[in-house]
Amino acid sequence: MATQYTEYPVTPVPRMFSWTGIFAGTFLFLAIEATFGILGVAIFTSATNPNAANPVGPGISAGVGIWMVVLSIIALYFAGKLAGRLTGANTRNMGMYAGLVTFGMCIFTAALISALTLGSTVSGTNGIEAVNPVRLADILTTGGYWLFIALVLAMFSAAMGGIHGAQRGLLVTSTTTRTAPEERRAA
């Protein structure tokens, strides 16, 4: 006589965090940001007039700023989603945390790359000290506001991507019929 057993799924021990997903999300962010950032710079650079007294108009600077904000939001959404998926986040909160840690890694990496690039560019004799202090203050103030808006929106986007990347565990049970060990020996 066959005995019916119900098999319950083995619940895996939840991983608290996986840096593999965070690094994958960071590299995805860098790839999207570099690829489409270069596209945006090429589009807005083609709108310049090199024969004019001021070849780069104010509209081009604003256009590049808006492009970079939108691009950061999109890139960090997908980076957070990938990180939430690859870290094995099984709740919305864990996915959000994976997205936020990915955001932090992306900002750190972008700041490091920018500092290394600017450090080698400005180290010459006609570096940052040749800029008018009033113009420098204007650039830093405007750029600071753009950067703050971009970072807040990108942080929100990375958190939402991590939430959407979190895997919802499916609870599947199956019923199988097996022969009990005592019945096998008797047969």
Image (cartoon, rainbow, N blue to C red):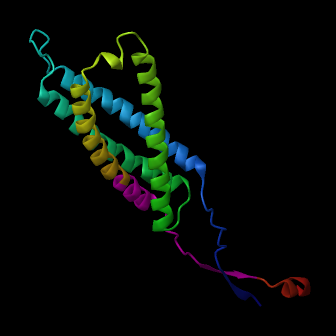
Residue 5 occupies which quadrant of the picture? bottom right
Whether residue 114 sits left or right of residue 13 in the image: it is left
Residue at (64% x, 75% y) in the render? 9
User: Magenta segment: does it hold 47?
Assistant: no
Q: Position of residue 63 (x, y in %)?
A: 18, 33
Q: How far from the left and from the top, in percent, is residue 91?
A: 50, 68
Left or right for 90, reference 181: left
- In depth, the one of 40 and 9 nearer the eye is 40
Q: Position of residue 70 (x, y in %)?
A: 26, 43
Establish if 57 lies above or below 10.
above
Query: 151 or 140: nearer the eye?
Result: 140
Residue 1 is at least partly visible in this image: yes
Of all residues shown, which one is farthest toward the left? 52
* Region in magenta: 156-178
Is 169 covered by the magenta stretch?
yes
Q: Quadrant of residue 159?
A: bottom left
